[in-house]
Amino acid sequence: LRDINRHDLVLTADDIIKREQNRDAGLEAFLHVVDPGLAHPKIVVDQPHVDLGAVARESALIRRITVLNVSRGYTQATISSSQPWLEVYPERLHLWAGIPTDVRINVHAENLPFRSEQRGVITVKVEGQDTIEVPVTARVSLTREMWRLTWRAISAALPESWRTFRSGWRTVARTTNSISAPFVRHSWLLWLVWLLMGLAIAGAIYLLPPERVAQVLPQLTPQLPEIWPEGAEIVARYGLPAILGPPFIVSVVWLVFVLVMLVGGAVWGALRGAWKSFFK
């Protein structure tokens, strides 16, 4: 520039360098000094209106708009929102000709009221161009919110239920091993316990009224009265319950214990997981 005696442009360039840290912005400013009629960059947005529709109250709702310099040169744009529930990033854009730039819109809908439509505006300010406004509308749907809460509860309940189920199964296994260990080492304990339980059952039945025994006798031993009339009542009243009662009682108690530990534990874990999901 000094060689062609344009010292004014040299001074202008030095002044731009001192006050402008961005080289692209400095070059654009210098070009407009050289050619005052040079067209400014033209900025457009791909979406004139962002309609979120029916949404749930969740903080992870994200939408994007694209800003593009469709003409020439370089410019910067400032992005802002008119509502606290709309957050934009980045707030400052560097726009070169033909290179699109995305703006992320974070929608914080967790505190929005139900059903009423909410409106906000995303503002794009560019030097040398009219401000661009992008309206954003949203409505919190009660149905979507209920589904979101239900899904969150289920998502938290299933893992917790599975962990509780596995813990219950380990408890059942440990308890079973602990109880069965003495009987495995000493097989005579099984017969002793069976005998004691049989005697206890027979003693308890001894207290039953005779008319009750008369009702149950034909059902337990239908052929025995014809073969051994005098022994039918004794066998039906004391023998069969004393022999079959102990394994039946042990099986029922063990089955109830397993069901309580597994099914009850799984249900309790699911309820606990669902409850915790609302306080995360």
Image (tube, rainbow, N blue to C red):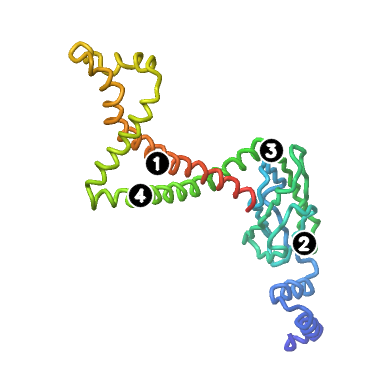
Q: Which residue is mark 2?
A: 126
Q: Which residue is mark 4?
A: 173
Q: Is residue 114 above or below residue 110?
A: above
Q: Which residue is mark 1?
A: 258
Q: CA distance from mark 4 to mark 1?
A: 10 Å
Q: CA distance from mark 1 to mark 2?
A: 71 Å
Identity of the amino acid at label 2? Val
Q: Residues within 10 Å of mark 2 (few under 14, many from 20)?
A: some
> Horizontal placement of 280 versus 125: left or right?
left
User: Earlier along the polypeptide chain: callout 3 or callout 2?
Assistant: 2
Outermost residue toward the top in this view: 226
Residue 103, image x, y percentages: 67, 57
Q: Residues within 10 Å of mark 3 (few under 14, many from 20)?
A: some
Residue 266, image x, y percentages: 47, 43
Label 4's element?
helix
Residue 112, image x, y percentages: 75, 45
Identity of the amino acid at label 3? Ser
Q: Which residue is mark 3?
A: 141
Identity of the amino acid at label 1? Val
Q: CA distance from mark 2 to mark 4?
A: 71 Å
Query: Which mark is in front, 3 or 2?
Result: 3
